Image (cartoon, rainbow, N blue to C red):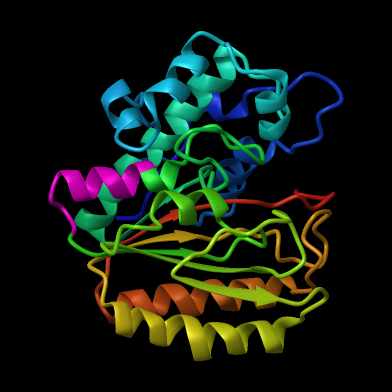
Amino acid sequence: MLKIAFSPVYRYQLPKGHRFPMEKYDLLPQQLLHEGTIAEENLFEPGFLTEQEILQTHTSAYWSKLKQLNLSRKEERAIGFPVRKELIERGRYIAHGTVQCAYHAIDHGISMNIAGGTHHAYSDRGEGFCVFNDIAIAANHLLTQEMAKQVMIIDLDVHQGNGTARIFQDRPEVFTLSVHGEHNYPLRKEVSDLDIGIPDTTEDQSYLQVIRNQVIPKIDEVQPDFVFYLSGVDVLESDKLGRLSLSVDGCKKRDELILNALQDRQIPCAISMGGGYSEKIS
């Protein structure tokens, strides 16, 4: 059974003037229920990420600053949000949702966090709307609990997973793969195990060739026993921040290629939704 992490706390409202589309976290499960794609039994509310789980990935100095709401203005600007207690709690629920999704994926083959994909967070700082790195936390959890030996992170958000790449730069048991806008944020890229930069305005055919010819063969080369898939929809032509030109059908085909490849190889997969900043989301 497909299990999808969703919690009302994901709806945390930012002060006026901040344009990050938080309402998508509420609208998506409602739409999936309305159209009959899922039932209520597919949804679960995640628990609260523990301090121990945080410190498996993030530094004690960074965690201390978050707890005490003691980030500098520069550090807060890098995150892009006013850092408040509610935002930190929201991040802890989201990250634990991805941890729980990993368990559900092992049991059922696949799971999804309706939020997550906070791949710009480093071990020692937040960045780009990301406070905790949910996929890194979940990957470290699986490895620590000896539930996986080789993890692969397939990051298809339009922005490079810079925080994730840096966290696992010296960890061969985690293979990081990022397909992203070559000239998009972040300006200074980190080095993933495989980085594929895509030119601005790339359309469906060229993008899907990259998935078929470079991403899927890499799955066979790495031979992971668990995959985290960051399925950002900011690759769409309609996205305010993406600068690529994929259609909705092209994005759907991308996901089908990845998920069918993992299902054929019987590799469990936990999906985090990642970015999506189109003007019309409903």
Locate the N terminus and report the quarter of the image it occupies. bottom left
User: Residue at the spot x=65%, y=51% of the render?
Assistant: 275
Q: Residue furthest top?
A: 68
In the picture, measured across the screen, residue 271 lies left or right of residue 195, that is left
In the picture, measured across the screen, residue 82 lies left or right of residue 95, that is right
> Measured along the vertical axis of the image, is residue 177 above or below residue 2?
below
Q: Where residue 127 sits: x, y (%)?
A: 62, 38
Compare residues 203 and 247 and report the one nearer the observer.
203
Q: Where residue 83 sits: x, y (%)?
A: 64, 19
Q: Could you say which quadrant of the image residue 111 lies in?
A: bottom left
Q: Where residue 10 sits: x, y (%)?
A: 56, 30
> Measured along the vertical axis of the image, is residue 88 above or below residue 78?
above
- Regarding residue 152, the answer to whether it shows in the image is yes
In the picture, measured across the screen, residue 65 lies left or right of residue 207, that is left
Compare residues 221 and 110 and report the one nearer the observer.
221
Q: Residue furthest left?
A: 146
> Measured along the vertical axis of the image, is residue 18 above or below residue 30?
above
Compare residues 248 and 145 and report the one nearer the observer.
145
In the picture, measured across the screen, residue 51 lies left or right of residue 161, that is left
User: Residue at the spot x=32%, y=29% of the render?
Assistant: 55
- Regarding residue 44, the answer to whether it shows in the image is no
Which residues are the magenta region? 137-148
> Measured along the vertical axis of the image, is residue 269 above or below residue 215?
above
Q: Specify whether residue 141 is painted magenta.
A: yes
Compare residues 201 and 183 and report the one nearer the observer.
183
Q: Where residue 136 sits: x, y (%)?
A: 39, 47
Q: How many marks?
A: 0
Please tell me whether the stretch drawn in magenta is mainly helix, strand or loop: helix
Q: Specify whether residue 273 is painted magenta.
A: no
